Image (spheres, coloured by chain):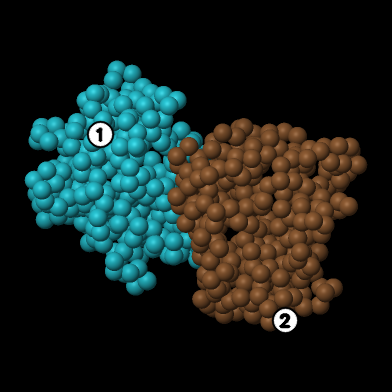
Chain colours: A brown, B cyan
Amino acid sequence: MLKVPDHQVAGHKGGHGQPGPLIDDSGRFYKPLQDDDRGAIEAAFYTSFSSNTRVPDHIRRFFPVFHGTQLIEASDGSGQRPHLVLEDVVSGRSHPSVMDVKIGSRTWYPEASEDYIQRCFEKDRKSSSLCLGFRISGLQLYGSEESELWKPERKLVQNLSADGVRVVLKNFVSSNSPIDPNLNPDCAFASSVYGGSSGILAQLLELKSWFEDQTIYHLNSCSVLMVYEKKKVLKGGSSDAEVKLIDFAHVTEGNGIIDHNFVGGLCSLIKFISEILTSPDECTTKVCLQNSDNKNEILTSSNECTTKVCL
Amino acid sequence: MLKVPDHQVAGHKGGHGQPGPLIDDSGRFYKPLQDDDRGAIEAAFYTSFSSNTRVPDHIRRFFPVFHGTQLIEASDGSGQRPHLVLEDVVSGRSHPSVMDVKIGSRTWYPEASEDYIQRCFEKDRKSSSLCLGFRISGLQLYGSEESELWKPERKLVQNLSADGVRVVLKNFVSSNSPIDPNLNPDCAFASSVYGGSSGILAQLLELKSWFEDQTIYHLNSCSVLMVYEKKKVLKGGSSDAEVKLIDFAHVTEGNGIIDHNFVGGLCSLIKFISEILTSPDECTTKVCLQNSDNKNEILTSSNECTTKVCL
């Protein structure tokens, strides 16, 4: 009954001697508990969060529902292993467009080991995190044809410049192909996905208000997942745009201080998305989003309005 | 006509072979241009800012007015030297209470030298900056008697815990003495200094709105200065509470990205001040703010409501 999920865009996958997540057909997502502290921290977070009466109901919907932990057969055949049982946030969606954005200019935290701090510090500096306050960890995007799926390499999207991130955030809500270098993203779905009273921007703003006030948790290295259904929009329906927070393996206690690192990064993401809504055509960015032979080729001209990004 | 200012609580002072700032009696503040990049960067910032039409008028009042640069005799007698000529932000105040808060969990920035980054990185981790998103760089506080002035050592206020910062932010708006260990800060002036439509909180919120949107400047290592007149409040008058941004020697271009490091830190400071306004008596904090022999003695009990802070 359990199978490997189709729509994972970031995070630990199965293979190479480690088990990956599994899903069932009743809408549950089974995430193997990591052996080290991370597994214990994430389980403790879900347990605390799901029973914490200080978390308002309208905020709870941004977090996957937690159904406890369960011993199940690991995806790599290594035997029984404890898994977090969570809501599968893309369950019921046949062709979801998904983007995973890791929030915060800093993914480390004072309580971490010196070795972990140094590794994160270097990665934050090399990736978009330090400059933008967030980095795109991965995404997938369906085209108008069912066969068409764009899923750029994670490594490439993590290190984008501001201009590159702008292009990808536009591609995410465009009807034309991200892999045709002669087409600029048309942002055809921007208003129905990012905009509106139930769109992604409104949801991010709701989260922001809470994060400006809550001092319970610091969600270090946590991601905002943005999901919508392109097919439904193409048929004139609602985009079913949804924001979820995921990955809590590095949560620490807030101790009466707001998560200012998360707030800053979230505000930066909000600004990028707002700009696409208010002036989608501001830059006639030249885009080439094919995988090239040189995987690291990301070209940005000095003129910020003629950016060429190759993924 | 020029003299050394009485009310400087942070930043470079004169002495030890370096010139310090000077003031005149017409409300101008003369800041010696630092020899290295910092002087050039700060002068460039003031020049750019003062003529930038994208800065709204209601935001301009939070920055000292800039009157150009001028060659004057340095305070240390080392001869003529270029100075920034700025508005003296405490001019006309006889007994100002002043607090300098350096905003941001990170005071370094990607463009800085590796050596500078490492030094800041260590200082941010050791001081309150990393945990709180800001650090108190210095303060002075008049008592009800003219002779009474509390000006704790900068080193001690920079490294305070969250509880210590809470105590000092309460002391700043209290009528009773911060150096009597048997008195809890009464927060008698909280509503007239922090609160109200023209109080410090309202001013910080106005700044926050702008910083969530502006992508022109990144104000690395810049401070919020909070000033008010205790004597006037004691006589039943207005507190004349004022917020100013100062210190722009590390400003970089925003390049279309908001200053998420500043936004996060500002939101954290706003939360601390809001809490004092909404529940000034929440913790009956035990405070002992006398200079002790052991200058580093900052005691915080595990019970967060019986904090003992010694400066």
Name the chain letter of the residue that bears numbered label 1. Answer: B
Mark on residue B62? none
Outermost right residue: A77
Instruction: State the image quarter where residue A79 is shown.
Output: top right
Q: Which residue is mark 2?
A: A235
Q: Residue at x 34, y 25 (%)?
A: B308
Tell me, yes or no, if residue B75 can be seen here.
no
Q: Compared to B293, does A273 lie above or below?
A: below
Outermost top residue: B293
Pointer 2 and pointer 1 on the same chain: no
Q: Is residue B17 left or right of residue A32?
A: left
Q: Position of residue A73 (x, y in %)?
A: 87, 41
Instruction: State the image quarter where residue B60 is shown.
Output: bottom left
Query: What distance separates the C-alpha of mark 2 from that of mark 1?
Result: 63 Å
Mark on residue B185? 1
Q: Position of residue A9 (x, y in %)?
A: 74, 57
Q: Quadrant of the C terminus of chain B?
A: top left
Specify the amino acid type for callout 2.
Lys
Q: Which SS class for mark 2?
A: loop
Name the chain letter of the residue that bears numbered label 2. Answer: A
Q: Which SS class for mark 1?
A: loop
**Foreground residue, A278 or A219?**
A219
Q: Residue at x 26, y 36 (%)?
A: B171
Specify the amino acid type for callout 1.
Pro
Q: Residue at x 72, y 33 (%)?
A: A36
Tell me, yes or no, if residue A35 can be seen here.
yes
Q: Residue at x 75, y 60 (%)?
A: A91
